């Protein structure tokens, strides 16, 4: 909580910048909606998804993007520079888990606007559908949200862990961002190799489509269970890779 409070205080020192970034965040959400609006302007459904149902996916995408750029990437991006300079010792010597410390070093509070925008999209989508989600659907979606955050975090941990062996991982982070942008579309839109990749290799389906399908009562029980177990296993594997990577770390004093 101390890290969150310090990040909030730092961000609010420049209130105009804080508000401007929040507005820009909402503008980008509007930009993300343009391709969706364009496609559904031409047809009433795409691969079995109506416009309001696809909006729910966009809402989850905006929510996850806010979490990624507000709570995950700001902290973990700085780790790469620490590894490159050999200055990670300052964190490793502290009496706390190193992964926890590097993961909570910095936050971007203005990214809360992405989450507020996501709630607005959810509200409009279900208004268009003419009904709200059932309580049990909300609970399942929240469980999948927790797993989705774990998977998103684990993917970033894997990218950061690569910096212990590779000098520059900037291209990996750019690739990560580019692939994640595809999460604004329902997984049913993709076919063949892309569907397989975005379901099992880079699990965008678990991060955006599956929680949306849970809210819409479209997610089969077997898929929900597999997603929950698979997401937890993926997060555990990332933890193992991180600890293995630390063993290869060479400090500036070595």
Image (cartoon, rainbow, N blue to C red):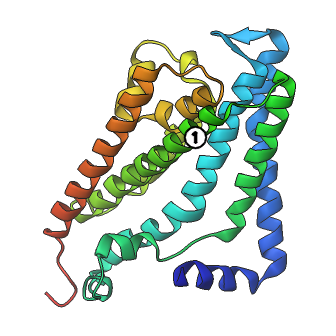
Tell me which residue sits at (29%, 76%) in the image: 97
Where's residue 21, x and y in %?
Answer: 77, 65
Tell me which residue sits at (58%, 77%) in the image: 4
Q: Quadrant of the C terminus?
A: bottom left
* Up/down of 182 relative to 233, above or below: above
Residue position marked by numbered label 1 in the rendering: 139
4 or 179, which is in the foreground? Answer: 4
169 or 32, which is in the foreground? Answer: 32
Q: Quadrant of residue 54?
A: top right
Where's residue 48, x and y in %?
Answer: 65, 9
* Up/down of 92 relative to 43, above or below: below
- Helix, strand or loop at mark 1: helix
Q: Quadrant of residue 61?
A: top right
Residue 172 visible within the image: no
Residue 247 visible within the image: yes
Tell me which residue sits at (72%, 67%) in the image: 110
Side of 164 relative to 72 (left or right): left
* Up/down of 96 relative to 240, above or below: below
* Up/down of 87 relative to 41, above or below: below
């Amino acid at each position: 909580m101390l890290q969150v409070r310090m990040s909030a205080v730092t961000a609010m020192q420049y209130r105009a910048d804080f508000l401007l970034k929040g507005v820009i965040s909402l503008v980008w959400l509007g930009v993300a909606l343009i391709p969706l609006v364009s496609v559904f302007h031409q047809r009433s459904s795409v691969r079995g998804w109506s416009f309001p149902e696809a909006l729910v996916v966009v809402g989850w995408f905006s929510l996850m993007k806010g979490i990624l750029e507000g709570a995950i990437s700001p902290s973990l991006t700085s780790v790469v520079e620490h590894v490159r300079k050999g200055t990670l010792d300052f964190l490793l010597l502290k009496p706390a888990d190193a992964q926890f410390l590097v993961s909570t070093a910095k936050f971007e509070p203005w990214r809360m606007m992405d989450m507020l925008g996501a709630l607005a999209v959810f509200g409009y989508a279900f208004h268009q559908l003419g009904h709200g989600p059932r309580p049990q659907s909300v609970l399942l979606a929240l469980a999948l949200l927790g797993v989705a955050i774990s998977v998103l975090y684990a993917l970033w941990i894997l990218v950061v862990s690569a910096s212990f062996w590779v000098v520059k991982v900037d291209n990996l982070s750019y690739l990560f961002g580019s692939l994640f942008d595809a999460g604004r579309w329902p997984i049913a839109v993709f076919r063949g190799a892309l569907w397989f990749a975005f379901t099992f290799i880079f699990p965008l389906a678990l991060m955006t489509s599956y929680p949306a399908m849970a809210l819409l009562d479209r997610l089969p029980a077997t898929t929900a269970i597999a997603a929950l177990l698979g997401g937890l296993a993926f997060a555990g594997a990332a933890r193992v890779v991180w600890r293995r990577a630390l063993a290869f770390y060479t400090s500036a004093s070595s």
